[in-house]
Amino acid sequence: MKKYVVLMNTTVKSAALLYFALVQLLTVQAQVKIGDNPEVIDPASILELESNTRALVLTRVSDTQMLAMAPLQGAMVYNIDQKCIFYFDAEQWQNLCNGGVAGVNASLVDNGNNTYTFTDSNGEETLITINTAPGGALEGEPGAIFFAGDDGAVTENTNELFWDTTTNSLGIGAHTTVNHKVAINGDLGATQILVNDANQEATPIIIRGSGADQRLVSFQDENLGNTLFNINFRGAGLNIDEINKPHRLFIKILGGMGIETREPTETLDVAGTLRIRELEAALPSDNIVTVDANGVFHRSANTSNKTLTLGNTHLVSAKWTNASSNFALNKGANITPIFAKVAFHDNAKAFNADNEKILRINSNGRYQIVTNLSLKGSNSTENGEIATISARIFVNNKPYGAWGVAANNGSTNREVLFSIHINEIIPLTVGDIVTIRIITDTKDKTLYVVGDSSNCTFIKLK
């Protein structure tokens, strides 16, 4: 049969009698109910307490007293220093107020200025601010974002951090966002920025300049922070500049691209030297590239299989022979006759003669010029030494190709015979002037270009 023990609110005058009675009862009872409803006890309970007016008070100890204990696992006490219940897990006391975090070093300190400092068992501090403003809300400039200042107190600085309630946008280092979602006035440091346009907008990043010379992006070195390159709007285009080089690359709006120039006149305008490290071998059908006096490239069709007209005869070349008379040379450079008659040309289709010494080009192309020069006369200088005799092709008064050096072919009637051979393939453009010059240090009028068929110049458009 289940038995109950009820301790009433009656003063027991004999402690020995009470102790005896409890011992006797507890030795024979499997369950004990103390407080209200003593006849009602859960079958699984050994001891139950029930009261609406009284409470269970655990053993009350200080930090020092608790840490001196070594009780059974599961023992519980109330720590009067920490103002919390602790239980013993067989190794150390656990604070139930910290969710079971070990240690007794957690604390909450009133700073006296409506703030509290909470220190956990690991020594980490958290500042808690209690707002005492009327209505329970912080008051400040509209759009202000509050944060802890240097002294830990709540503060605001709309020049550094600002929320625009009109445009629902954020300003960092800026009091106004100028209708941008995020406006940053200052440096932005990031190890990586990923632009992931989930909506697949046509232009996920837009950089908008505010003036004709607006700098958009700067690149600095990693050590001193010195600016090395800038990307900016300059004039009427996008410009990349470098230290002391303002126009490394310039893309003109509705115009060309310039390297070292902001005024490109062609699709690509290079104000400097140009080097191409690799070129594929040319094919017979390839066009020829020429450069005019302004440095502009032109394409000239390959006409090696085309026919030129000389009078009523169709030829791939023109040939001038039979000079009417000998041509006396002076010491130094002499422009040599190329042909005997002005009429000897291809009807001005590819080239024609201004006079017997000048060949003018009328068609862009690659020309083969072959000249055989026959000379006779003295080979002696004014000092009686053997003279030097050489020849070279000139284009627009500039030498082109190799020198042809005279060879001694013998003598007749006490005159020495010489011959010079030159063979060059030259890219020429419309308006180019071609001449052949003989340079010698013989005495004046002692050496002659022979006026017969042994002299000929052969011109061919390749």
Image: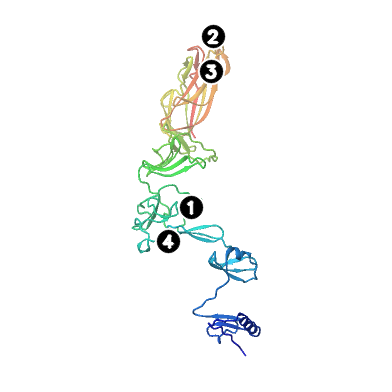
- Which amino acid is tagged 2? Asn
| Marks 3 and 1, the one that precedes in the sequence | 1
Q: Nearer the viewer, mark 3 or mark 4?
A: 4
In what element is the residue under mark 4? loop
The disc placed on residue 434 is none
Query: In this figure, which residue is indicated by the disc labeled 2?
Result: 383
Q: Is residue 39 above or below residue 436?
A: below
Q: Quadrant of residue 28?
A: bottom right
Q: Nearer the viewer, residue 146 or 169?
A: 146
In the rendered structure, the answer to whether residue 309 lies left or right of residue 65 reads left
Query: In this figure, which residue is indicated by the disc labeled 3?
Result: 389
Q: Is residue 18 above or below residue 168?
A: below
Q: Nearer the viewer, mark 2 or mark 1?
A: 1
Query: In this figure, which residue is indicated by the disc labeled 1?
Result: 193
Q: CA distance from mark 4 to mark 2?
A: 115 Å
In what element is the residue under mark 2? loop
Rendered residue at 51%/78% (across/down)? 54
Rendered residue at 40%/61% (across/down)? 131
In the rendered structure, the answer to whether residue 170 lies left or right of residue 374 reads left
| Marks 1 and 4, the one that precedes in the sequence | 4
- Which amino acid is tagged 3? Ile
Q: CA distance from mark 1 to mark 4?
A: 38 Å
Q: Nearer the viewer, residue 202 or 180?
A: 180
- Which amino acid is tagged 1? Ile
In the rendered image, the quadrant that contains the N terminus is bottom right
Q: Nearer the viewer, mark 3 or mark 2?
A: 2
The disc placed on residue 130 is 4
| Marks 4 and 2, the one that precedes in the sequence | 4
Q: Nearer the viewer, residue 456 or 236?
A: 236
In the rendered structure, the answer to whether residue 260 lies left or right of residue 91 reads left
